[in-house]
Amino acid sequence: MKKTTALQAILLLLQLLCFGVSSQSDSLTATMDGEERQFLYSAIQGFVGKWWNGSNLYPEPCGWTPIQGVFCDLFDNGMWYVTSIKIGPIFDNSLKCSKNAAFSPNLFKLKNLKRLSLVDCFHQPTYFPSMEWSELSSTLKTLEFRSNKGLVGDIPPVLGQILSLQSLVLTENSLTGEIPWELGNLVSLKRLSLSSNQLSGPLPISLGANLSELLIMDISSNSLSGPLPSSLGRLSSLLKLDLSNNFFSGDLLPELCSLKNLTLLDLGNNGLTGGLQPCLQVMIFLQDMVFSDNPLGGSMKELDWKKLEKLVHLDLSNTTLVGEIPDSITELKKLRFLALDNNRLCGSVSPKLATMPSLSSLYLHGNNLSGELEFSVGFYKRMGRRFASWRNPNLCYRFPAVNSAGEEGPAGVEKCINGEDCSQTENSTTSLEISKGSDYMSPGFLWALLVEQGVILSVLSSLRTFQKKAIRKKILFKAFINHGRAGRRKGKRNHGRAKT
Ligand SMILES: *[C@@H]1O[C@H](CO)[C@@H](O)[C@H](O)[C@H]1NC(C)=O
Ligand SMILES: *[C@@H]1O[C@H](CO)[C@@H](O)[C@H](O)[C@H]1NC(C)=O
Ligand SMILES: *[C@@H]1O[C@H](CO)[C@@H](O)[C@H](O)[C@H]1NC(C)=O
Ligand SMILES: *[C@@H]1O[C@H](CO)[C@@H](O)[C@H](O)[C@H]1NC(C)=O
Ligand SMILES: *[C@@H]1O[C@H](CO)[C@@H](O)[C@H](O)[C@H]1NC(C)=O
Ligand SMILES: *[C@@H]1O[C@H](CO)[C@@H](O)[C@H](O)[C@H]1NC(C)=O
């Protein structure tokens, strides 16, 4: 089937004008079906307002008076048809929606529409149209409604009839209700993003059953609950799975480990339990692994971390982990971000962490790590605020004698007392007082700390926590820049990295 885009037609026209080549060309004589033209005007008027008179402004919308955001293809019958509509502040001159934007029924009569994208369009409450989608069931490939605060109601089950759909992106709207089971019929789907809505209920089992071509699934920042269905393991092509910021519960399933090609796995801020599954180490392409803020439990030594050699971002913060930090983690050459804070980790901190070539953020605070921090002054300088180890009552630091005067130690960590092993200073009053926070500090004690370390611990502590969340957010943002992660958390559970 031969099709030519509008751009190609214009180029051809220019070619003819410039070089005087005379030839008969479809695209010069082609026209647009009269009905199709009226449907287009009416559909766009629905979005941008009654003032917009298409027939006056754009007599040939697929020809010499193109409408911003509207694209046409030339079909075999020598006619132009509208194949793509993008409305919203995408480019400076894009059409923008009016206050009373609405879906015109004529939109669904554009029978060759492949792509529909509405960004920041609906501000007044507007229901997701529920009936007409079946008319586009064999043509529509991309449906994107993004940042429409006014788009309310349920995701209509009839969307499950658009069997041609490859990309369904409904992020940052105000959609409610459950995810329809019928979306599991969209067997051509490569991207499914429903993030940052108020969807509730379970993740339908059907999504795992038949979507074997899915590459990206992002359902983050909703209110979904219940266990993760084991059918998720059948999404064998999946590259990115983000279910963070929901209320999922139950154990991490071994079935997840079938997702061998994942590069991003973010299950952060849910209620997941069951510990780190040893089989996770088969995900050898994984770059981002985020389990933070789950009562996961278990120990890090379940995994042979060096197998996950592509890891860049590992966040196990606040996951009730116990045990020691395994040495194998220091073999991750690409790891830039390592957050193990706010767990119950014990044992010593390996000096090998400082030799990891890419490591630029290391958070160990709020654990029960003990012994001496054997990092150099240079390490603390390089890491700056991206290193934190406070609230480990049995941890201490000691600089080599050459680094005498004025060097600042790691915040919130005591200097090792000469000749004494830190692990035996559990009854040290100062250490215990630090672990309880500033409420327990006498003014005299606080002053002594200020003089010794030149920092205000409690203020710094909160600042650094905040900054860490910001960094984490930034990195995730990068990972998602290609599929439009909304990232922001809304509503009742607005805490943690959502704040940035
Ligand atoms: C657009 O303007 C033409 C004449 O200028 C008028 O006939 C037509 O009804 C208008 N269409 C709409 C939809 O307002
Ligand atoms: C998967 O597809 C088959 C047909 O190919 C269909 O019968 C079945 O209902 C689908 N399963 C789900 C869970 O959607
Ligand atoms: C996983 O990735 C490899 C190569 O990167 C590819 O050959 C394979 O087909 C992928 N597996 C699936 C199930 O898509
Ligand atoms: C730790 O995670 C739990 C969920 O497991 C969450 O409720 C809590 O707010 C988190 N704590 C912090 C400090 O983020
Ligand atoms: C912290 O670790 C020490 C051993 O270094 C142990 O005696 C103590 O019970 C631990 N404390 C907690 C709260 O787990
Ligand atoms: C506290 O530690 C000191 C050694 O630093 C030791 O002499 C003393 O007995 C310990 N006190 C208690 C209550 O364990």
Image (spheres, grey):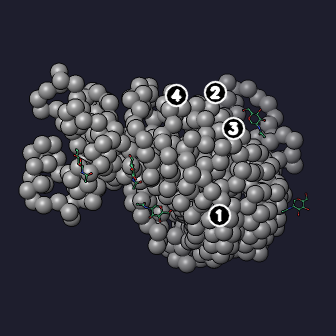
Q: Can residue 466 be seen in this view?
A: yes
Badge 2: few (under 14), some or many (20 or more) residues near its Cα, within 10 Å?
few
Where residue 250 is drawn, which disc sits there?
Answer: 1
* Image-quarter location of ligand 4: bottom left
Q: In this view, does 226 lie above or below 12?
A: below
Badge 1: few (under 14), some or many (20 or more) residues near its Cα, within 10 Å?
some
Q: Position of residue 75 (x, y in %)?
A: 82, 47
Q: Which residue is drawn at the image coordinates 50% and 50% (left, top)?
A: 322
Is label 4 in contact with label 1 (beta carbons under 8 Å)? no
Upstream in sequence: badge 2 or badge 1:
2
Q: Which residue is drawn at the image coordinates 75% and 57% (left, top)?
A: 230
Q: Mark 4 points at which residue?
A: 331
Question: Does the closest atom of ligand 3 sit within 8 Å of the Cβ of label 3?
Answer: no
Q: Position of residue 264 (x, y in %)?
A: 60, 44
Secondary structure under tag 4 reads: helix
- Gap in angstroms between the C-alphas marked 2 and 3: 59 Å
Q: Which residue is drawn at the image coordinates 33% and 54% (left, top)?
A: 466
Q: Which-is-in-front pick, marks 2 and 4?
A: 4
Badge 3: few (under 14), some or many (20 or more) residues near its Cα, within 10 Å?
some
* The one of 154 and 393 positioned closer to us in this rendering: 393
Q: Position of residue 19 (x, y in %)?
A: 67, 24
Q: Mark 2 points at which residue?
A: 18
Q: Mark 3 points at which residue?
A: 282
